[in-house]
Amino acid sequence: MEILQFNRMRVAFSAVAFSMMLAAPAAVTAQDAPASHMVVNLDTPGPVINRHIYGHFAEHLGHGIYGGFWVEDGAGGWRLNKPVVEALRKIKPANVRWPGGCFADVYHWKDGVGPRAERPTIVNTLWGGVTENNSFGTHEFMELVTALDSEPIVVGNVGSGTVKEMSDWWEYLNHPGPSPMADLRAKNGRAEPWNVRFFGVGNESWGCGGNMDAEYYADVYKRFATYLHRYGDLQPFRVATGPYHSEEMMKWTEVMMRDAGHMIDGLDLHYYTVVGTWQEKGSAVDFEEADWIQGIRKGLVIDEAIKAQAAIMDRYDPEKRVWLIVGEWGMWHDVEPGTNPGFLRQQSTLRDAMVAALSLNAFNRHADRVKMANIAQTVNVLQAMILTQGDELIVTPTYHVFEMFKGHQDATLLPVVLDEGAYNYGETTIPALNASASINDEGRVLVTIANFDPHSGRTVEVSLRGGTLSQVSGRILTADAMTAHNTFDDPDNVAPAPFGGASLMDDHLVVKLPPKALVALELE
């Protein structure tokens, strides 16, 4: 085949390649756009897609913990919310980040250990001004991640805490004993260490975590990180605060990698998709097509953010030892009407699902540098997987995206070249298509592809180069309306369904995508 020439991932196929594609032509209706082309390179595998890309986030915020993960047991106490845990286990949550978020830099861990009746209360001035009773602390969090079969990520207090406080927490979590903190842990009911390896040295230290400048935080980070000691075979994985993605914060990464990179294992980038302004973000469910396309356009910025961060990191770390972590990401809308503004409760529509899909596709494609990510957040807060109402729960369209993508975890990235096409609305033009692909140890290929165009179906003609596959199956996530979402009265309004629009012949796959749809294809 002649060399493929492409500009910004748009492929101009040679005459030879194009004739090959037409071997199994796809019908194009009057409402469909012209066919797009895609190449999946089965014979040139890339890096492994780290399962930690499919991570989650639980902060002491609204009903994320209390009323979400942690519920009253009816006898004056609290317990894990088993239906929530069972639902989350189905999407294979790789990790959970806790206790924040901004809350991490006001959290003093000793308030959350020991007999619950004796734990002090504080006022959560960050999120809603409610009283935090500290009944959910270190032991309860570790009970949660054990039940989820997830790995814990603990974020320490740099903003209002001390080096000793953080060092003591690390010892409490991990020292086998005897030691002062290991002995305290045993007194509180846990003799064995938990062997927590992921530890964040502060959160958003440029903002709610202390309003520090980059040079100052680099020094503070090195001081705090020094006292996260190795215990036996347990080596701390130290996560440094990275920037919020914006032009004015590019200096942050430069300074951190230059001044502290030798002590950093992961750098924590944050980026939220906000359709309007931070003051008026817009409704999660009441929006028009202009808001649909702007939401997806701003969601696609995550790919630009990763490239910009990776370019800086590569100069100081060409071996890619330091993980780029997208520690907070997702859509941020105005709160659900009638709820506490500080609780950040919002609905999740098909638009949120599309942003989740394009984000996960981006993390997959950049698997050489992106090794961990945490959607904000898991239950009842921002772009949640699950919404609860008393004893009831519903899963959101975003939950279904994570379930459809779970086969990418620990699979090997397959390079994809895609003619993305164009979706236009008003003066805005964005790519219409977005995809990633992987192959697991058993030889199964997973292709996840989204069509953002809410009006036109897209036929994608896929050349599978360098391998032989004989069967294809798939599922689709779509809805009649862009604003479609699940409610407690209609919990399955947006849910995956079998997809019959893919046909495979030899090394040629034809996929007929409906408008505003996400498809996950499994090939063997």
Image (cartoon, rainbow, N blue to C red):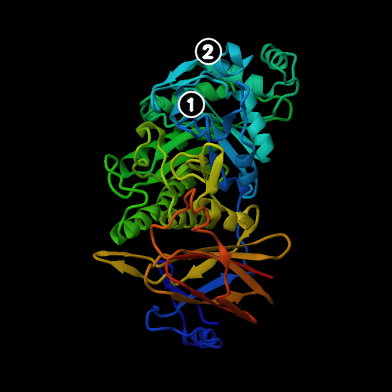
In this view, the residue in front, 89 or 50, is: 89
Q: Quadrant of the C terminus?
A: bottom right
- The answer to which quarter of the image holds residue 271 is top left
| Kind of residue indicated by mark 2 | Pro
Viewer can see residue 518: yes
| Above-or-below relation of 413 to 211 | below
Question: Whole-Å distance between the Cαs marked 2 and 1?
Answer: 17 Å
| Kind of residue indicated by mark 1 | Ala
| Residue corresponding to mark 2 | 120
| Residue corresponding to mark 1 | 104
The residue at 53%/13% (across/down) is: 120
Viewer can see residue 318: no
x, y (%) of residue 483?
A: 38, 57
x, y (%) of residue 113?
A: 61, 17
Q: In this view, does 457 lie to the left or right of 521?
A: left
The residue at 47%/70% (across/down) is: 418
